[in-house]
Image (spheres, grey):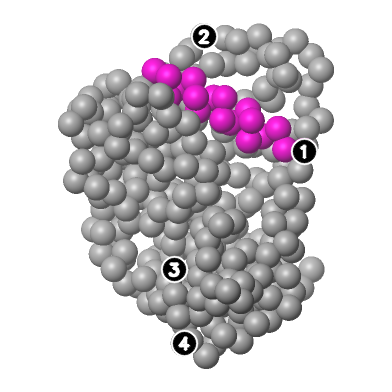
Amino acid sequence: MGRRSERLCKRGQGDIAGEGDVIQVVSRAFDVLRCFEGADTRLGNLEISNRCGLPRSTVSRLTHTLTRMGQLVYLPRDQKYRIGPSAVAMSTAMMRGLQLRNLIRARLQEVADQIPGTVGFLIPDRFHLVYFEYARAAHTLGLHSTTGSRIAMSRSAGGHAYLAALQPEAANAFLTEIEREEPEQAPVLRERLEASRTMLRERGYVISCGVFSPHVNGVAVPMWSPQYQTHVVVNIGLLGAMYDEQRIHDEVAPALLRLKGVIDALVQNAESGLVAVGQGAAKRARPDGKSLQATRRPAPSHSLTMSDTRRRQGQAPA
């Protein structure tokens, strides 16, 4: 194993912050691709330059190269770019055969049917979280995140929970990097870090009120993903007028911890091939505390690895 591979294994947080051997042109190419939030997004070089903070001349060279590679497509009539066939094919290949999303979505929906908020499973992408899956009740108002939506780390309970879950060295490196790249996010994250760590350690989750919007409160719990070698997050966003912090502690957090236990089992076993799991008749735990006979495939055995899971499901203080 080479030195760079050894450093990646030692870091073990899915974090590149503080590394001096990152190839900048590759990093910038991915910054350009991140600007396209959906398959129908159309952007010109100036818009891309404004979004990712790169000189327009640099963006022009990158978009030209990415277009030649099929990662982007140039639209002459609009004089803009959109995501290309190679990027779509790559993402499709990555998702092929994964029952993980369907299983996670079903578990999220069970909670959303009980709690009038947006329930999401999020994965980190540099200084943002991306909704891998989400669910909400039909009558939910004011919360409109969907699959693929991006949210800044500093503006969500999920982001604060993610940072609180990192080891101190990795968290400091992350904050140093975000101060350089997106300085407007850093103060909020630094200010709330110790409180978030304490809440995560003592209760197993993190609550953040009013950071996404003055009218929205959130609660989140991180978990370790062996598949992606990073922390992923389960998050619930709620209208503050309906759920203040105390009500979240009392009514929402217990449901979130149960949901975390179910999804954590799926995430922990995803690397071993979720598509190959099960022709048996094992029972799957539901977030509402009941059991559900597996109709597709049984859930894997529950394996909790993070330090914040010392309190078993239902035992976290309200």
Q: Can residue 161 be seen?
A: no
Separation of residues labelled 2 and 3 (CA atoms): 42 Å
Rendering coords of residue 162 (x, y %): 43, 49
Q: Residues within 10 Å of mark 2 (few under 14, many from 20)?
A: few
Mark 4 or 3: the one toward you: 4
Instruction: Choose top left, top right, bottom left or bottom right for residue 175.
Output: bottom left
State the SS at label 4.
loop
- What amino acid is at disc 2? Lys
- What amino acid is at disc 1? Gly
Tell me the quarter of the image containing the C terminus. Answer: top left
- Check disc 2 and report the residue beneath it: 290
State the SS at label 3.
helix
Q: Which mark is residue 97?
A: 1
Q: Which mark is residue 55?
A: 4
Separation of residues labelled 1 and 3 (CA atoms): 36 Å
Q: Nearer the viewer, residue 87 or 250?
A: 87
